[in-house]
Amino acid sequence: VRPSSSTADGLVDLLFGSEAVNAAVSDTAWLQAMLDVEAALAGAGADAGLVPSVAAEEIAVTCRDTMFDMASIGRRAVGAGNPAAPLVTDLIAAVSPATRPYVHMGATSQDIIDTSLSLLAQRALDAILIDLDAVAARCAVLAATHRETVMTARTLLQPAVPTTFGFKVTTWLVGVDEARAMLRRVRFERLAAQLGGAAGTLASLHDSGIEVLRGFARRLGLAEPLIPWHTDRTRVTELAASLGMLMGVLGKMARDITLLAQAGVAEVAEGEGPEHGTSSTLPQKQNPVRAVLILAAAERAPGLVGTAFHTMVQEHERATGAWHAEWETQRQLLSLAGGASQHAARLLEMLKVDAARMEQNLASGGGLLMAESLAGCLSSKVDRAAAQAMVRRCHEESAARHVSFAELVAHDPEVRQHLSDAEIASALDPLRYLGSTHELIRRAQDAHRAADVRS
Amino acid sequence: VRPSSSTADGLVDLLFGSEAVNAAVSDTAWLQAMLDVEAALAGAGADAGLVPSVAAEEIAVTCRDTMFDMASIGRRAVGAGNPAAPLVTDLIAAVSPATRPYVHMGATSQDIIDTSLSLLAQRALDAILIDLDAVAARCAVLAATHRETVMTARTLLQPAVPTTFGFKVTTWLVGVDEARAMLRRVRFERLAAQLGGAAGTLASLHDSGIEVLRGFARRLGLAEPLIPWHTDRTRVTELAASLGMLMGVLGKMARDITLLAQAGVAEVAEGEGPEHGTSSTLPQKQNPVRAVLILAAAERAPGLVGTAFHTMVQEHERATGAWHAEWETQRQLLSLAGGASQHAARLLEMLKVDAARMEQNLASGGGLLMAESLAGCLSSKVDRAAAQAMVRRCHEESAARHVSFAELVAHDPEVRQHLSDAEIASALDPLRYLGSTHELIRRAQDAHRAADVRS
Amino acid sequence: VRPSSSTADGLVDLLFGSEAVNAAVSDTAWLQAMLDVEAALAGAGADAGLVPSVAAEEIAVTCRDTMFDMASIGRRAVGAGNPAAPLVTDLIAAVSPATRPYVHMGATSQDIIDTSLSLLAQRALDAILIDLDAVAARCAVLAATHRETVMTARTLLQPAVPTTFGFKVTTWLVGVDEARAMLRRVRFERLAAQLGGAAGTLASLHDSGIEVLRGFARRLGLAEPLIPWHTDRTRVTELAASLGMLMGVLGKMARDITLLAQAGVAEVAEGEGPEHGTSSTLPQKQNPVRAVLILAAAERAPGLVGTAFHTMVQEHERATGAWHAEWETQRQLLSLAGGASQHAARLLEMLKVDAARMEQNLASGGGLLMAESLAGCLSSKVDRAAAQAMVRRCHEESAARHVSFAELVAHDPEVRQHLSDAEIASALDPLRYLGSTHELIRRAQDAHRAADVRS
Amino acid sequence: VRPSSSTADGLVDLLFGSEAVNAAVSDTAWLQAMLDVEAALAGAGADAGLVPSVAAEEIAVTCRDTMFDMASIGRRAVGAGNPAAPLVTDLIAAVSPATRPYVHMGATSQDIIDTSLSLLAQRALDAILIDLDAVAARCAVLAATHRETVMTARTLLQPAVPTTFGFKVTTWLVGVDEARAMLRRVRFERLAAQLGGAAGTLASLHDSGIEVLRGFARRLGLAEPLIPWHTDRTRVTELAASLGMLMGVLGKMARDITLLAQAGVAEVAEGEGPEHGTSSTLPQKQNPVRAVLILAAAERAPGLVGTAFHTMVQEHERATGAWHAEWETQRQLLSLAGGASQHAARLLEMLKVDAARMEQNLASGGGLLMAESLAGCLSSKVDRAAAQAMVRRCHEESAARHVSFAELVAHDPEVRQHLSDAEIASALDPLRYLGSTHELIRRAQDAHRAADVRS
């Protein structure tokens, strides 16, 4: 069996994937998963009394221990249109003549491929969720630690009002927790066994179809579907959508980090040691490499997700192409999600947060970020339009006279007519203008803990 | 207020939308929804003691009764980058001076736009779900009625084994029920109010942020989010994904119908009367127009869904473009889903099913569709490989001698050596080779009824 | 005729479209274009002697002057699956009985719709190209003006080496010129008339098919296709792809502008006067609104382009849905491109460039951006590894000792051992490290002028 | 060097790719292409007098003969964010100390990666074009051979009028020729060398930048770009778009073939021998496997193309993720196109065309397909509305009385009042209702030959 297309020794496999998930979705893993599926089918057949237990046992052993020739299977897959058919041929040849009638009993190629891909997804999601648990946990810690670390909130990439780094991270946390919940639901409720026979009727299993289906699903740890889903592909598309959602959530976090890491901002940096993110010719460089690779995944995922939605339109009882288009789409999404999740876990683990620089950047606006706050205070004294006009005038004068907004306000006669020095100081203090951030952080932390208890 | 871009008098609005959903997502409806949001905000402010109730009342009345100038708002939207800002300006101008300070209190443009789009989606989904309830109900009836209507199952567009029309429709039913469950979940749990102020901190509402958020959501019948979701866009993407899922499920049904309606197949037809699907120059034409229009929607949806996933990567506290890209994407998906659902409801309501033709097409294969069944019966007498070889030989001889497979089998000495006449007849009888279809249909019907009780 | 779904009085039509292009692709314009097509068809029929010239004349006049009922056509479009069929019915009814046989002669609905959409695209592209000519011209001016305006080049959002604003704009210019060339090619060579009759054979025109096709195309100013393209959709997809390419190119420019406009960078700003990009509550705000709206278009286009590629798979002689999916996809892309082009033209026209701030930001790195330059100079004295090690050590020492890189280098004994003061000064001078930018700018300007002469 | 992720021994590599193209875009090939690029860079440096020729020679030999450790490079790629950086490190270590300063001179990682991917695309396109030449040639032969093979034209999957198989294939031919022209243009004009140094200015090459760029491009057989295209990605997107166009064109052909191969139609079949497209359990099966695999490629391509359009929005002088997202997108599209082209070539080479069945299916409509023809003939005697009404009545009566349309028409008193027996026979003769198909086929053949002469 050749090393898979997704193992760690590829040129870019670790840029866009993780070792664990790449291994879980590799060709080698897929071939083995198809064999696991055949073994489970024989076992379920034995449970239902259709397969002698000695035959089921021989099939299981063969599926576990025999070396199949992937290159040969890959070549013969073309004539059949899928890799399951030649594998079944080889499996039949690999067992004793007495056992042969019981191999692949009641199943069609699609049953083997769909179920084996459910297994791949299951194993890949388990690896992804380990990294995501770490991501969420680290977000929760950062959110708590930096609950009071004031920084500039930026809307449309322009400074807006103060916020805290803890609150910013809380938005990441909530997104990651939402994605984890979706992925867990798909993992435990939607990844299903598929068994329908030639066209979904389970005809060749006669009266035992449902019984075999049930045992088959149980043995593989997959959900038992209501009916075969050979051309109802909601499950496959839900997997793709939940992975796309994850990549979107991680992409948002990575986008923030690349922006915060800009030289002129410098509020965070990837902190992975001297060799990380450097350039051979530009010694000053500290590239946010992990964030960039997460963004690359977030850039690639939506096209693949779109394909997954497109492939839902499947003809009759097996599709001419749309089904086949799912396989690589699904494996690529799992691989990308594996890479993005691992990068995110490492990135957050080592993230350097420069609270002093955050405060300094906030202050560098000369208090302008407190304009809304000041207008609010003034509104309790004069009407809102007048308050806003006063603030706007202060802003214009401070620009024209090249003094900071804060300084100008502190000495502005009109402002001072309405507000005391203490009131002005308070109105210009970012720490007093954090609104509900504390409570919102607490809500998110509570929900995060509750979700972790439930899962 | 000009007639919306989505009302029923457009050139193609009823091809790709429904009157009800187009109205729900029209520019007119959106403008009104933004006003509804401002009214609810004032009301929630009054509940929290921040807004005098007379001011809240004046705002509510103004939002309900005043005619705003959409063309002017649309023009001024460019400078602000969104239509909420000029609307707020006009709303402030429309109320009395004493009330002005209380308009839009604590909110930013994004709060108004996000929340108003949640309202639009809510109203559109309600209309869509009415049609989908009808689609599912009709599928359930067809599945029950045609439980024993045998027909050809086709895999890769080639005849495979017998199935029943009832079982084929059951695959549609399960898909539609899955989509309905997703849409309902989005409708009742995920469409949320958005209120965060300038950057999500609710700072200008001081200590009352959470209280106002809660009242605001409650007044609008929208979910109260854990924290503001200004740049955590999972909710928006879930809406898009669930609509895409629906379009995929309906597209699968429509694809089957166009294929079954082919002249050489003729097992179903759209049954909407003499003018429907005709051509002026080709009098024999009976085009499956509704199915075609559903397929057009299914063709367009995935690109829009892909966009929705892409827009998740939003910078800091408000995005430069990705947020703005959501608005039309979302409205177009709702509109397309409205059209596809209505077409599906009408199509199924009037669908002509030709059970006789189904049986005739099944028989036209000369019994070849029973090859698997025959091989299965023979397998109980000889080993599987021998059984399959025998069937294959019969197939080849029947082709070479231009007799039907069934006839050849009935007189084949080798087959008759192993099977009695009755056994041969039984092996070739489609009605005896329907596997678990009855039980599978029953399972789907039970789940369908249970889902309807729950909802 | 109702105001179109795309005219200027919508809520967001001017955010995502331009008045000119919206008008060109509106429902009203489409209806008229279909009538123009019918008139041209009758004219071509008259040229070929198949239609009495009086009939052709009556058809032309009716198509020009009659008010058709769009709402009614829109309603009846559902039964036919397209709006051309009911329009033809109404057109037949609107002419005298003697003329009726000559209406729509030889054509099918698809001929009318495809050709009318070619017309819409032609008119929309003409409007788009006017804005793009302005964009390119303005880029050329900015590139020339700022040929020596040094600034920081940024890779992976980190400072890299010096560049000039003129060179940065040259990358925009080349992209815009490439997009213009593609759009012009589509406009003049690929937008074609479609005439094939019921299934592309031109059968009902007997021996005159090609002659009528030729006259039909000529009268409309559209390309005459080699053969009817009813299910060869490369032309449609090329239009979509070239529009997507444009949006990508403009999106790149807009992305740069939003990043350069960040408060901590402040090297450019949209300069459209006091009301543009402001916020009612945040007086300091100067949002890059045009750039944001261009980015929104660039965010939406790829999904639509993907749909256009998907719709190429069209069945037999007319597709079941993929064809219908083209119409709105194409119109939306044109509209988005119209908006993005107009925003780009306005934005560049008014763009404020702060050359002093560019120089200041460049200098703020303390000379670190000249590290590569210094290493290069040192490489002529010691080997490259040693040179790079020296530079790296200087970087580390400057960070540790909190002095600027330039200052440290100027006094570093090891550096001074190899380089004279003048050599060090030269190595640290950004103006001496602009490489081939002058020549590259000249090449792009030459090509730009040559392209404009050709077009 | 490990076997690449794309070689022929994978599980599904030959389903979705071809051996030749997979090899051309494999990790191994990519690694070698990066080395080829480094060698060409050194050579160009030597041409310009910047690199001693002995050093350039040593670099070239090392790049050709040394075994680099891909697994190690792949692991270290993570820290750098791309595989070129560690490869350069290893290449420097592999040459003698005196040569080291001349390795990678003037270049940045992006130069190496972009140029090497141009080389990969060039080699892959050469392989693809060989298959496409065969596809087009075979289409041309089929079109000529079957110029008079009448068959049913089908619109919206319903019978419309007669056409010929030769004309249907001509639509395929024109599409394939359009795609070939685009791919050739990209191959010869748009695949370019990329050389810009750290940020596109070519600064570290001082005055020799353009000269080195020119020699570099010439040595690699790639186009010399106007300016570096590090963040002007039109070239990359044009490659993706032209591949997507190809997949759309082949997908249309494959879709037609799967539909024509349906059991109830049976007008064509894949003809690749007894093992091709069979099923182990359903002996009658003859699945159109090649067509299905082409459709799978056509299903996957648009999502990847959409991603390629999305990645155009690249920040400043190197993008944070959008650039990295290109690499696999591009390689996957090339691989898919390789597979689809090879499948298409094999499929057409062996395609079985059943002209007799085509004629029989045409006749099976009982002459209904000649309804338009008959109405046309009658229109020369009575007015068009009357003619159409007569035809419609005949259609209805034939259905009601269960006689064929042709038979009914032949005896219909009203029809016979206007048309002689000979005229009726002529009106109902498909061979007399083929319109301009002969001339259209000739036009396409002429253009095809002319294109082949030019290329």
Image (cartoon, coloured by chain):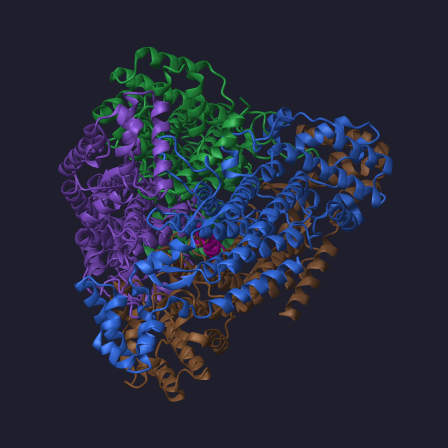
Chain colours: A brown, B blue, C green, D purple
Residue D26 lies in what quarter of the image?
A: bottom left
Quarter of the image that includes the N terminus of chain A: bottom left
Residue visible at 30% across and 29% down? D413
Residue D7 in view here: no
In the picture shown, does residue A317 fall above or below A427?
below
Q: Nearer the viewer, residue C138 or A359?
A: C138
Residue D345 in view here: yes
Residue B405 lies in what quarter of the image?
A: bottom left
Q: Residue furthest top?
A: C54
Lateral position of residue D103 relative to residue B142, left or right: left
Residue A295 falls inside the magenta stretch: yes
In the picture shown, does residue C419 fall above or below C101?
below
Q: Position of residue A410 (x, y in %)?
A: 78, 36
Which is the main secondary structure of the residues drawn in magenta? helix
Q: Tell me where the magenta segment starts and ends, as one range.
A: A282-308
Lateral position of residue D56 relative to residue D69, left or right: left
Residue visible at 37% across and 85% down? A61
How many dots with numbers?
0
Q: Position of residue D86 (x, y in %)?
A: 35, 60
Q: Nearer the viewer, residue C353 or B282?
A: B282
Lateral position of residue B183 relative to residue D347, left or right: right
Q: Nearer the viewer, residue C232 or A441?
A: C232
Q: Nearer the viewer, residue D105 or B445?
A: B445
Q: Position of residue C257 (x, y in %)?
A: 50, 36
Residue D297 falls inside the magenta stretch: no
Quarter of the image that includes the C terminus of chain A: bottom right
Q: Residue furthest bottom?
A: A54
Residue visible at 25% across and 78% down? B416
Lateral position of residue C132 relative to residue B38, left or right: left
Q: Position of residue D323 (x, y in %)?
A: 40, 49
